[in-house]
Image (tube, helix red, strand yellow):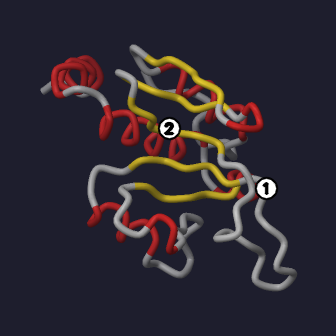
Amino acid sequence: MPDDNGSRPACVEDVHELALAMPHVTVEYGTGGNPVYQVGGKSFVFFRNPRPDAVDPDTGERYADVIVFWVESEADKQALVQDEASLFFTTAHFDGHPSVLLRASRIDELTRNELAEVVQDAWLSRASARRAAAWLRAHHPA
C-alpha cells in the first residue's frame, strides 16, 4: 500500500523506520553507539562514525552524518554516484565495496518514497535469496 505521505521530504527517522519495517531485521550498535541494521547477520544500512576519508572539501572537517547503504552491484553503485547532481557519493575507502554514502544533512533532498526504495534495495541486496523472493512476491505481485 503506498504511503500517503511518501512525497514529503525524507528525514533521518525515516531511515530507522524503513529499515526496521523490513522483515528479519536486527539492530546491532557499532562504535559510538551507531545503529547497524542487519538481515541474516549481514549489514544493509549503517550510520558511520566520522572518518578521514569523508570530509568537507572547504573546511576539511570530517562528516559526522554519513549513512551507508548497500547496493546490489558495482553498476548500481556507479549509477548512483556518477551523476554530479546525485546526493549519493563514495570514497576511496569504499572502492570495490557495494555501497553508497549519503549525508544525513542532505536526506531531505530525497522524498520518503525515494528513501524507501534505497532502503528496500539495500535490504534486498543482503537478504537471502529465499527472503528476498518472498518479499518481492508480497510487495510486487505479478
Judging by the rendered image, the residue that carries numbered circle 2 is: 116
Mark 1 surroundings within 10 Å by alpha-carbon count, few (fewer than 14), some (14 through 19), many (20 or more): some
The answer to whether residue 78 is above or below residue 118 is: below
For label 1, the SS is loop
**Amino acid at pointer 1:** Ala
List x then y, in percent, for residue 42: 39, 31
Q: Nearer the viewer, residue 108 or 74?
A: 74
Q: Nearer the viewer, residue 126 or 108?
A: 126
Residue at horizontal 72%, vertical 39%?
12
As drawn, the residue found furthest toward the top would be 24
- Mark sitting earlier along the chain (1/2): 1
Residue at horizontal 76%, vertical 83%?
57
Location of the N terminus by quadrant is top left
Residue at horizontal 77%, vertical 56%?
105
**Amino acid at pointer 2:** Ala
List x then y, in percent, for residue 91: 54, 71
Judging by the rendered image, the residue that carries numbered circle 1 is: 64
Q: Is residue 73 left or right of residue 101?
A: left
